[in-house]
Image (cartoon, helix red, strand yellow):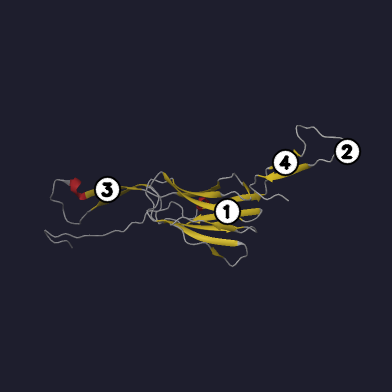
Amino acid sequence: TLAVGADATVALTVKPVQKGFITNISSVTSDAVETGIDVLSNAASDTVNIHAVDLEILKTDSVSGLGVLGQNYSYNIKVINHGDADSGSVAITDLLTGSNLVNLSVPPACTSPRSTLLPNQVSFTCTIPAGVAAQSTTTVTIPVVTTGTGTVTNNVTISPDPAEINPALATHTSTAITDIEERADLGITKTYSVTAHQGLLNTPYSYKLTAHNSGPSHAT
């Protein structure tokens, strides 16, 4: 029963599971005979536009998969928001595996690299506190120096956002594989002890051979 001059309120909580428009149409009826002539006041409608976050992570290296021992390279971690809503804080977990242990110089937003339970493996976490704006990209760069030849596998994952369209998307992980090889730049010079290429019969003279390696790797 709704007394004369009284109000009754019903609260509904809605949790959207997909983006787009949600229209809510409500109406009120009674067993009593309506005395008002404004029947439009018996119904109310409201439409809400639901926005969503759509994150993707991409990992690439600066050497297109082939690095050289003795030369620095870097990994670029790109977090892309394809959605129409800004994301919250984003956590990136980076896991590097390789028989040639790497020296990392992580940016301030990342934790110090630490060894895992597996051999030749290090892990660290980077945070983007401000999140990633809608339709934009944020990049985190990780400089690397290798200590030996071999393969480095770098796998990154990002934490899903509460407003994500699909928090289980495969786009939340990315892997880059970098092969490290030795590469040297050798040269040789030759000098001799005679002047202007002129020697004398039965008079010894000598050659001096000098090999040089301009690097970046050692030559054996």
Q: Mark 3 touching mark 4, by CB under 8 A? A: no
The residue under label 1 is which amino acid type? Val
Report the residue marked by disc 3.
46
| Badge 3 or badge 4: first in the primary sequence | 3
Q: Is residue 96 left or right of residue 204?
A: left
Picture coordinates of residue 116 (x, y %)?
57, 65
Local secondary structure at mark 3 = strand
Q: CA distance from mark 3 to mark 4?
A: 82 Å
Q: Which mark is residue 24?
A: none
Q: Which mark is residue 145?
A: 1
Label 4: how many residues lie within 10 Å, few (<14), some (14-19) or many (20+)? few
The residue under label 2 is which amino acid type? Asn
Q: Which mark is residue 188?
A: 4
Local secondary structure at mark 2 = loop
Picture coordinates of residue 199 (x, y %)?
82, 34
Report the residue marked by disc 2.
202
Q: Is residue 45 left or right of residue 60?
A: left
| Badge 4 or badge 1: first in the primary sequence | 1
Q: CA distance from mark 2 to mark 1?
A: 55 Å
